[in-house]
Image (tube, rainbow, N blue to C red):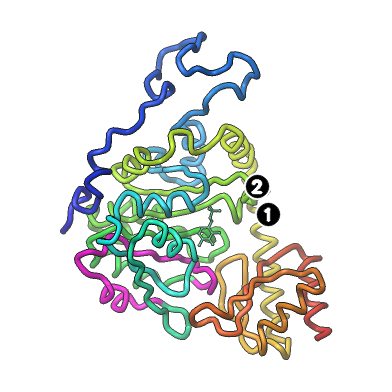
Amino acid sequence: MRSLQQLTRPNIWGLAPYSSARNEYSGHVAHVFLDANENPYNDPYNRYPDPLQQVLKERLSQVKGVPARNIFLGNGSDEAIDLVYRCFCEPRKDNVVAICPTYGMYEVCADINDVEYRPVELDEGYGMSAEKVLAACDAKTKAIWICSPNNPTGNSIDRDEIAKVVTEFDGIVVIDEAYIDFSRHGSLSQLIHEGALIGDKAVTARVIILQTMSKAWGSAAIRLGMAFAAEEIIGLFNKVKYPYNVNQLTQEQALRRLSDTFAVEQWVKMLIQERGRMIEAFEQLPLCTEVYPTDANFILIKVVDAQKIYDYLVDKGIIVRNRTRITLCRNCLRITIGTREENNELLAALRQL
Ligand SMILES: *Cc1c(COP(=O)(O)O)cnc(C)c1O
């Protein structure tokens, strides 16, 4: 089994990170700050934010049931995705394996970092075969990407298949749970940290779980993504990230959002109810030939002519996502669940076709 050091790029393992003024001063009570070349005026935005976002992490820890020391926060989950490559993958030498189709950023970040990307096709029902994923790996495979519920297909990936990948692969396994709040299956984060999914703690120490405030939490604009992982991995991410990667406005707004979890629960409840209604409505539409099962806040449907319907909807000022050029998604549209009124407008438009 490869150690975390063997999985990490040598320059990153040995990296002496930038030490900011706010890193070096901590703990003592102070009231005169002349250490960071800040302007003393324009309080409170004259000050650099907490580089490790301790207050926000403590609050998230309560909400998510994950210890604060196992949380990394970034400028969207996209930052954590990029950090996986920058920390573990040697350009032009290492590779990663991912289910296909899935979220496009895994491949874009692989391309940017000049790392080989190996897509493994899901089956016809968008299920993952652990065996097929493992067969695509070799000694240079550093990470495997699993998105569950998956984007753009909407379904959850079978837990036993995920467990098999995690158990048998001796590298990093990233499980992207951007849509977990809409799923009937809970997050794998607690299961993993309690060792309930896979008994072997050394194995689960290589799992990174991604979540975000962009979807159920209604906060895509503030750019706040989370990674839950072993302390050693969080430490690597913290070394490589920009020192002040999560700005003060974002930290404040995230805390405000987290102070009203009731609102989030209500939104999720309404969206799940609307999702059920939309599934039934799509099933009645003649132009819709298939409605795929979903655990997310969107529905993938197969239609007779995706491009034609997409253009027709654009004409009416309604934008959905045309996924027809994506592997296994020929003539598929991905439709986000909106408010009841927005959903009705979409249905009315489709019924006129
Ligand atoms: C929307 C989405 C994200 C969120 O990315 P942010 O950078 O946090 O906004 C992450 N993963 C998947 C699969 C998504 O669909």
- Pick out the residue farthest to the left: 1
User: Who is closer to the viewer here, 117 or 281?
Assistant: 117
For label 2, the SS is helix
- Residue 74, above or below 164: above
Q: Is residue 302 left or right of residue 125?
A: right
Q: Position of residue 90 (x, y in %)?
A: 27, 55
- Within 10 Å of disc 1 (Cα), the crowding (few <14, some 14-19, many 20+) is few
> Residue 54's spot in the image, x, y percent?
46, 32
Q: Is residue 123 magenta?
A: no
Q: Is residue 142 magenta?
A: yes
Query: Which residue is located at x 43 percent, y 58 percent?
Result: 109
| Residue 266 circle label | 1
- Identify residue for label 2: 262
Q: Where does the magenta region start and end?
A: 128-155
Give the amino acid type for the residue marked by disc 1 in the picture.
Gln
Q: Residue at x 40, y 25 (%)?
A: 20
Reply above or below: 254 against 176.
Answer: above
The quadrant of the image that shows the C terminus is: bottom right
Residue 156 placed where, x, y %?
48, 70
Residue 210 versus residue 132 in the image, above or below: above
Cα separation, mark 2 vs mark 1, equals: 6 Å
Seen from the viewer's position, the closer of residues 65 and 345 is 345
Q: Nearer the viewer, residue 138 or 212?
A: 138
Position of the N terminus, as image quadrant, is: bottom left
**Disc 2 residue type?**
Phe
Disc 2 to disc 1: CB gap under 8 Å = yes
Q: Quadrant of residue 106?
A: bottom left
User: Within the image, what quadrant is residue 259 found in?
Assistant: top right
Q: Secondary structure at mark 1?
A: helix
Q: Give the image location of residue 173, x and y in percent.
A: 33, 60
